Amino acid sequence: MARLAARMKYMDAALTAGVKIENVSAWCRDNGIDRRTFYRHRKRVEEEGSWRPRSRRPKASPGQTPPEVEAQVVRLRKELAPDNGADAVLAALRGLAQAEDWAGRNLRVPHRSTVNRILKRNGLAESRPERRPRSSFRRFAYARPRDCYQVDATVVKLADGTPAAVFDVLDDCTRLLAACTAAPAETGKDAAAAIRAAASARGAPGIILCDNGTAFSGGAARGQGAFARQAAALGSRVIRSSPYHPQTCGKVERHHQTLKNWLARQPRQPATLTELQDMLGQYRSYYNGRFHTALGTSPRRAWDAAEALGGPGQLPRQDDATVHKLTVSAEGKVTTGARVYISVGRAYAGQAVTAIRDHDHFTVYTAGGDPIGHIRIDHTKRYQGALKPAA
């Protein structure tokens, strides 16, 4: 290939210089060049004075995004900041297309990949090659609003640098922020106040998912603290996070970042807990009305569009998992509806436990919500053996 390119370059130079070639067939044969190629190049040299490669770009690009649509993508990227990802831009474009009758003007909303190309072309896309593609994630979520609330606390700072705790209560299904409360510190009393506020605003959930922090666990009085008592009064079941998929508080933990970014952008930082709580009320309204990429709509609209709500006394439903209330037998075993036997341990004989089955993954919890252990189910046998202890 390199030798042919060199011969072609030599031929073009000879033709441009006007070298006289009396026997074209012999010259082409000696140089390994097709005669049709020779005559095509000679004709262009005679017409244009030299050989220059021509652009392969088509004269017309009917599939190219119209300039006015591209301009709207660029505008929305800047105006929607910081919630200005491709999905948020697309949601705004769809509303704009309907309001301005794009269909009547022969315009259409571009595909997500096209929006990303437009942003990249205009220097507005941030390259993050280390990020996993969204297609590699499998979303785990409860099927109905109020099936499960995730609750967690994070630390923020007041204007003078004094730390304060913010308790977030997030609905697992719709990502709706049911409560967002400020407190001097992360205590059981304030955790109880947060879940009480969420229940007052949106109703009590069937399950409350939290971590093993002392505000939620009760510390030395395991499962007997203010938070546990408040959950029991609501009729909700507390489950504490396990290091095993899918029982994690990932949604609410990720939400802390969104909250802190919003607070940092405010022109005036709160000086007192009262001011902080007022700002959290504004934030909650903003967050529940904003476009959420995972939902394809806003949390508030997702909640309002739900056909049914969960709550205490109902087994939560999940998109890709099932919840089971089981009693451990005298031999220390439990069984599912599929007649699969699993050893929990004789120490739990006669006790009520909760089991969550995520496809082949089976995790068992105590009545206090602490993970006992987990196991991967082997469908070739009925007795699965003992649980692997939770770390």
Image (cartoon, grey):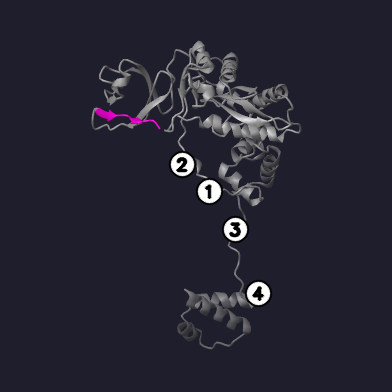
Residue 127 colored in magenta in the image: no
Going from the N terminus, do you reach mark 3 or mark 4 first? 4
Q: Which mark is residue 130?
A: 1
| Tag 1: amino acid | Glu
Q: Residue at x 60, y 42 (%)?
A: 110
Residue 388 colored in magenta in the image: yes
Q: Which mark is residue 48?
A: 4
Residue range in magenta is 383-391
Q: Residue at x 24, y 27 (%)?
A: 383
Q: What is the x, y in percent for residue 305? A: 55, 21
| Tag 3: amino acid | Pro
Indicate left or right for 66 with 233 as reference: right
Residue ID for mark 3: 58
| Tag 2: amino acid | Ser
Going from the N terminus, do you reach mark 1 or mark 3 first? 3
Q: What is the x, y in percent for residue 322? A: 39, 24
The reply to whether callout 1 and callout 2 are in contact (CB within 8 Å) is no
Q: Mark 2 or mark 4: which is in front?
A: 2
How far, Cα to Cα, is label 1 from label 4? 49 Å
**In terms of secondary structure, where does tag 3 sit?**
loop
Q: Mark 1 or mark 3: which is in front?
A: 1
**In terms of secondary structure, where does tag 4 sit?**
helix
The quadrant holding residue 291 is: top right
How far, Cα to Cα, is label 1 from label 3? 35 Å
How far, Cα to Cα, is label 1 from label 2? 13 Å
The reply to whether callout 2 and callout 3 are in contact (CB within 8 Å) is no
Residue ID for mark 2: 136
